[in-house]
Amino acid sequence: MFGALLGRKGSDLTGTQVISVLNRLSATAGGVTRAALNRAGVLGRSGLNSYVVSIDYDSGLANSVEVLRRDGRLDPDVLVFNMFFYYGALSESLAKLKKKPPLSKLSVTPALSVPVRRSRFIGATELQSVEFFNSAGVIFARELLDKAGNSVSFQLNISPALTYTFKAREDACTHWLEELSENGSHTVVIADASTASDVVTNIKSKKASKVLTLHGNHFSDPYVYGSSVKPRSQLIIDNAKVCDSLVLLTESQKVDVGRQFGDSQKISVIPNSTTIFKDDFVVKRKPKLFVVVARLDAVKSIGRVIRSFKLAVESDPELVLEIWGRGSLEGELKALILELGLSGSVFMKGYTRNPDTVFRRARASLSSSLSEGFGLSLLESMSVGTPVISFDANYGPKEIIQNGENGFLVNSEQECAAKIVKLAQDNSLFDYLAKGGIESSNRYSPDLVGQKWLGLVKNLSGGESYNNDFGERTVFENTNSSGSGSIFISASEIAGRPLDCVRRVEIVRIDRTKVFNDQYSKLEPGVYRVHSITHEPGSFRYAIKIAHGGRQHKGVIPLKSLTFKLLS
């Protein structure tokens, strides 16, 4: 699954950095962010320089960081960086002090200046210019967006001597991560956000190892082996071919990925660690109270819990269900509660920053997700002695819950209702499951999971780094016409160079005088992501499929109408 590798000498972790990459860092974020913060804290306490970075503009980031530090979710040893805050502060420092400040001075704190974003349309065109100002009112970055909101140009103007122009914002993000990588003897960059996969994959620094993570089930509905693969997951699995490691959360998912895409020694299984909650207060547990803590969206299928609870209440009218979370289906779920006559038994409680307090009050937590990569909330519930009743699903519930030992796996609303009623009435059963849950959660402690991450960092720092230098100077023309969006290239032109490191195609020029089936190409010059590269059996050519903004191009491409480059 992975390509050619270069050796890296030595395994001393002195000066080693670990960078966890998110789109945004929010105090109201879910399981992926909590998992990234848990890992960053453990690695920071292990002596590594551990950073959490975000790549989206967020004017409220400093406040989120302050909240996360105050409630203990963000370790004091972990620095937070954001590309816009970083370059805004750097441009100010170079203008005032004529030198770059220490890295810690560019981390996000309440004292760091908040960059300002403003946008405007350019004349009568459909292009939009987005400008970013530092606290001195000087523009340090400018992005150009097309009418669909896609980034088509990004400029950094840090100082007169430090100006850069990129083909898109993603390339600027990659440049920033490469710059951060230079601050250590070796850097392991981990893409936690699925949409950061390309940004991390395109890093070329010889001082950096690239790790991709798959936090969710990679299958589409019905979320089992044989189902189609989600486009975003497919991108991560494809990008893993030119990265140093792909981290999955469960052994069962590794088996499925291996069956479909081929086994690889570069795949690691490292589960999420449970959150360590403060234990300095007592909350009275209510034996008739059950809770849900989840996003209110379709994949969580919370309607199944509500319908199950309707059946349970018919057996025991004293039962109460609290649903904690926010999401697009909030209104729909409220309507279902009213429709089923449960307004006196089921309550929508909104978002909570303290899930442990919610779990501690309850007899059990309920999960009905159709698909879980892991299910951090399952562990969080178990860690405070609250058993879990979960609908059976790939992958987390199957791996975390041992039926009848630390909770229950159910396959129908009737079965879920029966387990709710039984657990509410049986104190001995509750005590047994609570003990089993605590023992299970201990196997996912931050220290134990952190050791797995530390082992991976050591292997990458002392071992091998992927070589993805294809060479970007060569210009090609498409060698055949296509009616389905394929860019054809002769195998002889590749001349033995590896295509598994080609992640993007830059279309330099389009000749619209060339036609195929009386149509010309409607592509525009720019950089496109490679969706797939296939060798046609019995031919001497490769077919390259490209995509932009998540959409695969399927239009006409006449012979020799494109001049393009292959980019790593």
Image (spheres, rainbow, N blue to C red):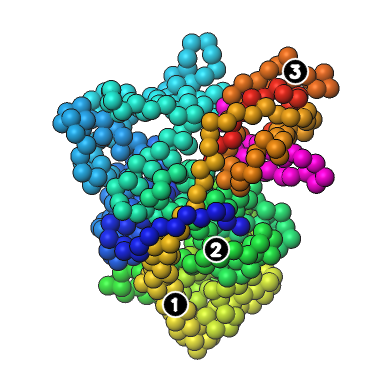
**Residue 386 against residue 40 in the figure, above or below:** below
Residue farthest bottom in this picture: 428
Q: Is residue 69 visible to us here?
A: yes
Query: Which quadrant holds residue 87?
Result: top left
211 and 316: which is toward the camera: 211
Q: Main secondary structure of the magenta part?
A: strand
Q: Residue at x 57, y 31 (%)?
A: 474
Q: Residue at x 45, y 29 (%)?
A: 166
Which of discs 1 and 2 lies nearer the camera? The answer is 2
Q: Are marks 3 and 1 in contact (CB under 8 Å)?
A: no
**Residue 437 against residue 167 in the figure, above or below:** below
Q: Read off the residue under disc 2.
A: 267
Q: Read off the residue under disc 1.
A: 443
Q: Quadrant of the N terminus?
A: bottom right
Horizontal relation, residue 328 to residue 20: left or right: right
Q: Read off the residue under disc 3.
A: 514
Q: The magenta stretch spans which residues?
A: 524-547
Q: Amino acid at mark 3?
A: Lys
Q: CA distance from mark 1 to mark 2?
A: 21 Å
Residue farthest top in this picture: 124
Q: Is residue 289 visible to us here?
A: no
Q: Residue at x 43, y 40 (%)?
A: 174
Q: Are marks 2 and 3 in contact (CB under 8 Å)?
A: no
